[in-house]
Image (spheres, rainbow, N blue to C red):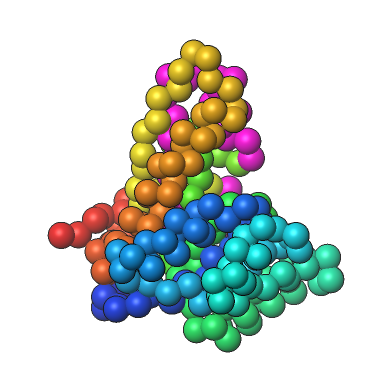
Amino acid sequence: MLRIMPQPVSRLKLAVLASGRGSNFEALQREIEENALPAVIQVVISDREQAPVLEKARRLGIPALYINPGQFADRQQYEQELVRVCEAYEVELVVLAGYMRILGETFIRSYLWRIINIHPALLPSFPGLNAQRQAVEYGVRFSGCTVHFVDQGVDTGPIILQAVVPVYPDDDEESLSQRILKEEHRLLPQAVRLIAEGRLELNGRKVNILP
């Protein structure tokens, strides 16, 4: 068994990787500002130059970087730059919050079991893109969201927390997405808090939550 954070920390140093609006980034920062989450966001990184999350971070005085994947020869070089930046900011935990690129071996190996992702479905159902649309089209009665550790598969890492959301007969992708998003904003800070408090233990695929 592996204790994820053997010694609890007073302020867990985070990097947030995001590609879009940044509402989960805002949820994390709100909990930090209310002293409900023992963490600090060291840097926000996006693969999209115009991602709103970058401007939101800058307004709060948080370093916000656009790292253009297209300027690198391959994914390995791009991920080497991600590692370099995270190391420069002394990052202890990487949080993927709507980051739309699949991370490969170079980055995952450098931060093994120190990368978490929030996914808008109850994994292992509906991995990958457009999970909410997949759920509506499949006709499930319940969906939700999952926080999981990142491994080299697509949304296949060990599950930390899940929240269930009903799917109503008149739901479309947008209405279900909004209902799930509210749970994401609650669940992601909770997972980060558990890691900061040293309360997660990895036993194969199972994540134990300690008292």
Residue 79 percent across, percent down from the top left: 67, 71
Residue 17 percent across, percent down from the top left: 59, 63
Look at the image and give the residue range highlighted in magenta: 129-154
Residue found 65% across the figure and 65% down from its top: 54
Seen from the viewer's position, the closer of residues 41 and 162 is: 41
Left of 20 or right of it: where is 126? left
Is any atom of residue 76 visible in this view? no
- In the rendered image, the quadrant that contains the N terminus is bottom left
Seen from the viewer's position, the closer of residues 65 and 4 is: 65
130 falls in the magenta region: yes
Residue found 37% across the figure and 49% down from its top: 187
104 falls in the magenta region: no
Q: Residue furthest left?
A: 211
Tell me if residue 87 comes above or below residue 12 in the rendering.
Answer: below
- In the rendered image, the quadrant that contains the C terminus is bottom left
Residue found 51% across the figure and 35% down from its top: 178
Which of the 4 quarters of the picture holds residue 58?
bottom right
Q: Residue furthest top?
A: 169
Residue 63 percent across, percent down from the top left: 60, 77
